[in-house]
Amino acid sequence: MAAVHTTGSSEEHLAARLELLAAEKELTRRGDEVARMRRALPWVPVEKEYIFDSDKGEKTLRELFDGRSQLLVYHFMFGPEWTAGCPVCSYWADNFSGGIVHLKHRDVTMLGVSRAPLDRIDAYKRRMGWTFDWVSALRNEFNYDYGVSLPDASAGASFEDMLRQRGSGPRPDGRVYNFTKEPFAAEMPGFSAFALEDGVVYHTYSCYARGLDAFNAANQLLDRAPKGRDEEALPTPIAWLRRHDEYEDHGGN
């Protein structure tokens, strides 16, 4: 079904645009206030010692800061037995590499963390053409402790397996699965922030589900396209999505 829209004169557009501008400015001011509230959250000391596998050998959480005082972690859905990373997390990760160089110059390190073994992470990263650092938490409880790895009878299944098991259409009760709210896999996406001060690592913030949307530039751009994300008629919001090398025309413009 085609999106519903109105047509009108330039004058009518300008009047509606000025009304929208006032709402956008209010949203920006509210966003600034929420950011201040986020920074004001109490810092919680991380008392557990975590050992990660990285391309440069074993590293502790403190060592992942790489000489900086702030660390951002994207919890990427990639289970120990999966052969490829989650396509939705891949959609997010397509936005990372270009921005991380700028974060480094603001005293911030950013990287991915998954429970997949390092060799599979590295192979998938090469396939996707990404350059950001990505470590394995296979041998620790990091992703469990930060709420993204979940005990599940289907822990060995891939993301695609989960979709096949649950289906992409309505549930038996007629409702459509909400993949952002209903755990359907042993791995879920998330984002966590940490600070390093006087040798102590602190957890400062985590977010999940719609809280991750701000990190996806493609979604933000779609929101400003004439038809928006245009997902209302799809069985699920992600039904259209593929890894960037899986679209039929991925090699073209």
Image: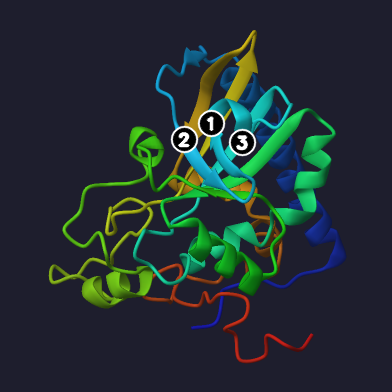
In primary-sequence order, the first of circles 2 and 1 is 2
Under tag 3, what secondary structure? strand
Q: Which mark is residue 60?
A: 1
Residues at discs 2 and 1 in contact (Cβ within 8 Å): yes
Residues at discs 3 and 2 in contact (Cβ within 8 Å): no
Residue reaching furthest top? 198
Would you place residue 59 above or below residue 198 in this image? below
Residue at image coords 33%, 50%: 181
Marks 3, 2: nearer the viewer: 2
Give the amino acid type for the residue marked by disc 3 in the picture. Leu
Give the amino acid type for the residue marked by disc 1 in the picture. Thr
User: For mark 3, what is the residue?
Assistant: 72
**Residue at mark 3 to residue at mark 1: CA–CA distance:** 15 Å
Would you place residue 128 above or below residue 71 in this image? below
Residue 3: name its quadrant. bottom right
Is disc 1 surrounded by few (<14), some (14 to 19) or many (20+) residues within 10 Å? Answer: few
Give the amino acid type for the residue marked by disc 2 in the picture. Ile
Work out whether residue 210 or residue 10 is closer to the camera in this orientation and state it: 210
User: For mark 2, what is the residue?
Assistant: 51
Is disc 3 surrounded by few (<14), some (14 to 19) or many (20+) residues within 10 Å? Answer: many
Work out whether residue 139 or residue 65 is closer to the camera in this orientation and state it: 139
Under tag 1, what secondary structure? strand
| Residue 100 left/right relative to 199 | right
- Residue 99 placed where, x, y %? 77, 49
Residue at image coords 55%, 82%: 2
Would you place residue 116 above or below residue 141 in this image? below
